[in-house]
Each structure stands twice: as structure tokens, then as C-alpha cells.
Amino acid sequence: MPDLSLLAWAALALGAVTVGISKTAIPGANIAVALFAMFLPAKPSTAALLVLLIVADVFAVVFYRRHADWRILRRLIPPVLVGLVLGTVFLSQASDALVGRVIAVILIGVIALGLVQRRRAERRERAGVEVAETGRGTALTQSAVYGSLGGFTTMVANAAGPVMSMYFLAVRLPVTVFLGTSAWFYFVVNLSKVPFSAGLGLFSAELLLLDLALVPFVVLGALVGRLIVHRISRRMFEWTVITLSVLGAVYLLVR
């Protein structure tokens, strides 16, 4: 077991709880990314967090398996695979500091773009102008851009949350469909990352023991999220997602 201070254990436990909540109620696992990166070496911290994310993904899939939008998920498969490969190559060459800053710049850009798109849509709705459905070409372009960025950012820092959350908000999914689509997306993607991370030598017996000690906190967070999800309004849900995404991006930029 890693030799960590009481403060470090408390922070990691809190991070594990937020992982569970983020999968079943409010996407925001990037808070855990920050906490784990503070108290563990940056690259191994991504492997430790990956195991806990997969545990939480199982709960999310069980709870919301019937609500996924498979049309959107099928569009995302090719660009996400491209992003995973590019992220693996980048991770094998880049320093921890460079990884964090590159991811932060990407996330801030994506969040800013998403906010501009939402602002325009809201203005059109207030003006009584019907918002047309996204055309096939635009939909494919969106999935290609967000999917490749999501694959890249999840591979190098488990930080696809802000990218994919903004994408799922952009296509205006209802809350339960948002959570169901996210659940299946992250479950498949995180499982796909395991061989890449193992090939980079990021797993160790020490980290797996650490994960074993933190799993109960993930389960606790998942159950708490399940209890509160139906008490959250759509508007509060969306702005909580956006706020957590911004905080995660800023942390990666300044750490």
C-alpha cells in the first residue's frame, strides 16, 4: 500500500466519492482528476483513477442502460479510437507538465465553443425562431471533433468529461438519456484504455491495492448520485456540468 499522509487519503477518498456521483448524477469526475494528480505522480495517477472509473461505470450502466442514444454512440466510435491512439503516442513522449497544459487549452476551447453555441440557441428560442435539427453533415462533423478530442483527453488525463459533456449538451439530450449515453460511452472507452495504459507501464501492485481500498467510496458515491439525480432540475444539471468542466480545465492549466 502506498505510504500516504492522512490528508492524502482523505483527498483520494473524496475523489473516489465524486467519481461515483459523477457517473450516476452529475458529470464531474475531473474533480477527481485534480485530487489524484495532487497527491500521486501525474501519470500513475491516471491509471489509479482509471480502475475506479470503470467500477463506477458498471453502476452507471446498470442504472441507466435503457436510456442510451445508440445512434450518437455509433457516430463516436471511429473518432474516439483515433483520439485514443494519438493520446497514447503523446503520453509516451510528453512530460507531465506539458500533458496538463495541452489538455487544459483544449478543454477551455471546447467549453467556450459550447457556451457560444448554447447562447445562440437560447437567443433564437427567445425570439420565437424555431431551432432546426442538426443536419447529418453537421452532426458528423461535431461527433468527429468532439470524439477525437474526447479520446485524446481521456487517454492522457482521464479528462474527457468536459469535452463529452459539452457534446452531449450540444445535442440537447434529456437528463436520463444524457446519463445513459454517457454511461455506455465511458464504460466502453475506459475498458479500451486498459491495454494502452498497461503497455505504458502505468499499473503497479501498489496502485491496485490503493484502488481496492478506495472502491467502497466509489460505491457510496454511485448510490448517493442515484438518490439525488431525480431531484435536480434540467437547468441546474446543465450549469453544474458546465461549472465543473470549467474548474477542471482551469486546474489542469495552472497546476
Image (cartoon, helix red, strand yellow):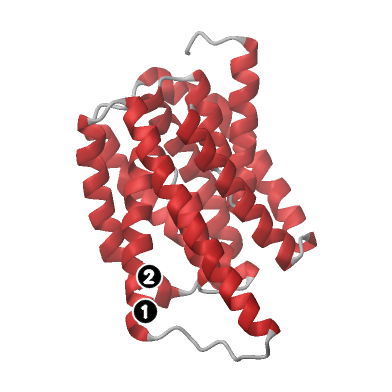
Dot 1 amino acid type: Thr
Residue 13, horizontal then vertical, whole percent: 62, 27
- For residue 173, say whether it is visible: no
Residue 20 sits in quarter: top right
Indicate whether 82 appears above or below 116.
above
C-alpha span from label 1 to label 2: 6 Å
User: In the picture provided, is 157 more to the left or to the right than 130?
Assistant: left
Residue 84, horizontal then vertical, whole percent: 27, 49
At x 73%, y 47%, the residue is 224
In front of the other: 134 or 155: 134
The residue at which mark 2 appears reads as: 142
In front of the other: 158 or 227: 158
- Label 1 packing within 10 angstroms: few (<14), some (14-19), many (20+): few
Disc 2 is placed on an element classified as helix
Dot 2 amino acid type: Gln
At x 59%, y 52%, the residue is 27
Residue 161, horizontal then vertical, whole percent: 49, 50
In front of the other: 63 or 182: 182
- Any mark on residue 227, and which? none
Residue 172 sits in quarter: bottom right
At x 56%, y 33%, the residue is 215
Residue 148, horizontal then vertical, whole percent: 31, 57
Disc 1 is placed on an element classified as helix
Q: Are marks 1 and 2 in contact (CB under 8 Å)?
A: yes
User: In the picture provided, is 18 more to the left or to the right than 40?
Assistant: right
User: In the picture provided, is 217 more to the left or to the right than 200?
Assistant: right
- Label 2 packing within 10 angstroms: few (<14), some (14-19), many (20+): some
At x 59%, y 41%, the residue is 247
- For residue 91, say whether it is visible: yes
Indicate whether 168 appears above or below 53.
below
The residue at which mark 1 appears reads as: 138
